[in-house]
Image (tube, helix red, strand yellow):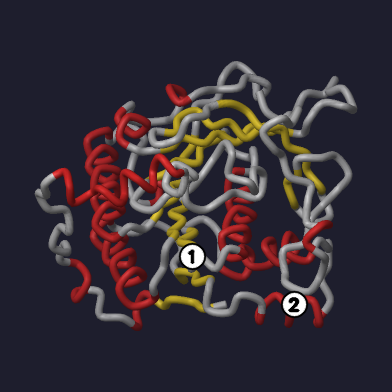
Amino acid sequence: MNLIEVDDIDWEKYREESLPKRKIKEKAHYAEQVKSYFEGTLIKRGSNIPFDSSGVHIGLRPSEVSVWAGINGHGKSLLLGQVVLGLMEQDQKCLICSFEMRPEITLARMARQATGKEIPSTTDLELFYSWKRDNLFLLDHHGMIDTDSMFAVMRYAHQELGVKHIVIDSLMKCVKGEDSYNEQKDFVNALCSIAQDTEMHIHLVHHMRKGNDESHIGGKFDLKGSGSISDQVDNVFIVWRNKKEDKNPIDPDGLLICAKQRNGEWEGKIKLWFDKASQQYTVEHGRTRLYMDGRVSAQMRGPYINQESDNVW
């Protein structure tokens, strides 16, 4: 895996906002794109997530911003790490900017998910590092980061590395204060502009307000801070962990909730089960999946949900 050292790059080169690529064009210019939309290539939504591999319900399209929200401790960063593995599997280049976790911890958790093992062997780890090489980059920076530097990192990743997906974990490490509503609005607005100009997909991790107890399943209006966050972004995904003490054994361990999908046609919930050893979320209790090429046949890479699955509602 590749570490980006903040001090080793002349970020000033990338601080200036790139020229907008959006132009005024006559409607006929978009004839092929509209045709593709109705033929299903664009409406099929770009990249898939591991919990909906057919792309029937959820897709991660270019030029979009997604918020991944959840109560503290409900596993949103962990789940998003697994989503990144799924993107790498589709040959998408990704950059993880985790300001709350050191790169080696992030990679250790992803190695468990990729190998399906609690303690991967040396051989497992070597395979993990060689698998989809140069498809995963990590920003080596811990703590707060100023917004200009964050934007420069994103432009650098796009221009120099060819990155298609960027994870920013989290909003509160880029904007000081939960009540800095105007700063939050401006930051998210800038993310949307950069996504449009670069055609990258930006994944922003954010926190939710905690209700009376953790069994409460919140919605897009329960995001902390400015209400404009959910208004501006394209997608809002909520990760909820089932921490009920009286949980029925057949109940899922959590939910992935699609609370907003501007360019999609589905909103709803996907049931998830959590495998503690591999740190994987799965859509079927008791089964995990392997991501790395050559480790398992295509028929055994499931389970996956489909349009008729009982895992969604």
The image quadrant that residue 224 belongs to is top left
- Above or below residue 227? Residue 33 is below
Task: Locate residue 6 relative to residue 310 in the image: left or right.
Answer: left
Q: Residue at x 82, y 52 (%)?
A: 288
Q: Are marks 1 and 2 in contact (CB under 8 Å)?
A: no
Q: Residues within 10 Å of mark 2 (few under 14, many from 20)?
A: some
| Amino acid type, label 1 | Cys
Residue 188 x/y as whole percent: 30, 43
Q: Residue at x 18, y 51 (%)?
A: 29
Give the quarter of the figure containing the N terminus: bottom right
Pointer 1: what residue? Answer: 94
The image quadrant that residue 35 belongs to is top left
Estimate the spatial distance between the alpha carbons at disc 1 and disc 2, rounded to whole Å.
19 Å
Pointer 2: what residue? Answer: 125
Residue at far top of view: 212
- Above or below residue 11? Residue 72 is above
- Above or below residue 215? Residue 83 is below
The image quadrant that residue 122 belongs to is bottom right
Q: Determine whether the residue tagged by mark 1 lies in a helix, strand or loop.
A: strand
Residue 50 x/y as whole percent: 65, 50
Q: Nearer the viewer, mark 1 or mark 2?
A: 1
